[in-house]
Amino acid sequence: MNFEHELLVRAKNLIFTKDGKSIRIYGVYAINSLKNATDPIDPSAKQFCSVGALRRILYEMTSQYPGRAHELIKAHEAAKSRLLRNTKIYSSFDRIHSLNDSEQDTTLLRVWDISIKEAS
């Protein structure tokens, strides 16, 4: 099982619609339905930034795959490293947060798609 790939795909689905429209948030990891900042693992969290989406999916997968937390944490770190590397290659930013908080939706989507393809 490729946990890194699954984590990336599921996290991307939290910040982009199926047709590639961005639904991510800026400046905080997650917000609830009242638009208040919250922790990504909070059950009330409804929208996420790129890093918050990864954290949320790691949390969900840890429950889904009990006893495999160590593998999941390694996959999470690999996914973050892959996204960071591709952010530096395909954008003018040197941090995932900076690209996420920019208005470069097409570039962010490209970084996610390339990262997912590489992880498969």
Image: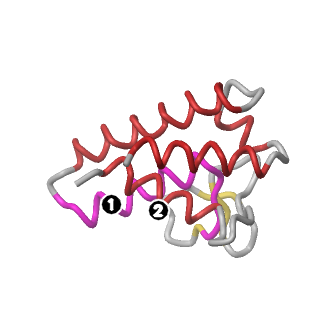
Q: Which residues are magenta?
A: 46-66
- Residue 119 picture quarter: top left
Residue 72: image location, x then y, percent = 29, 47
Q: Mark 1 sits on what residue?
A: 61
- Residue 45 picture quarter: bottom right
Q: Nearer the viewer, residue 107 or 46?
A: 107
- Residue 46 picture quarter: bottom right
Residue 57: image location, x then y, percent = 44, 58
Q: Mark 2 sits on what residue?
A: 10
Q: Residues within 10 Å of mark 2 (few under 14, many from 20)?
A: some
The residue positioned 57% from the left and 46% from the top of the image is 51
The residue positioned 58% from the left and 48% from the top of the image is 112
Q: Is residue 114 left or right of residue 59?
A: right
Label 2 and label 1: CA atoms lie apart by 10 Å
Quick check: 67 above or below 60?
above
The residue positioned 70% from the left and 59% from the top of the image is 24
Instruction: Give the number of the mark in front: 2 or 1.
Output: 2
Q: Is residue 101 left or right of residue 12?
A: right
Amino acid of disc 2: Arg
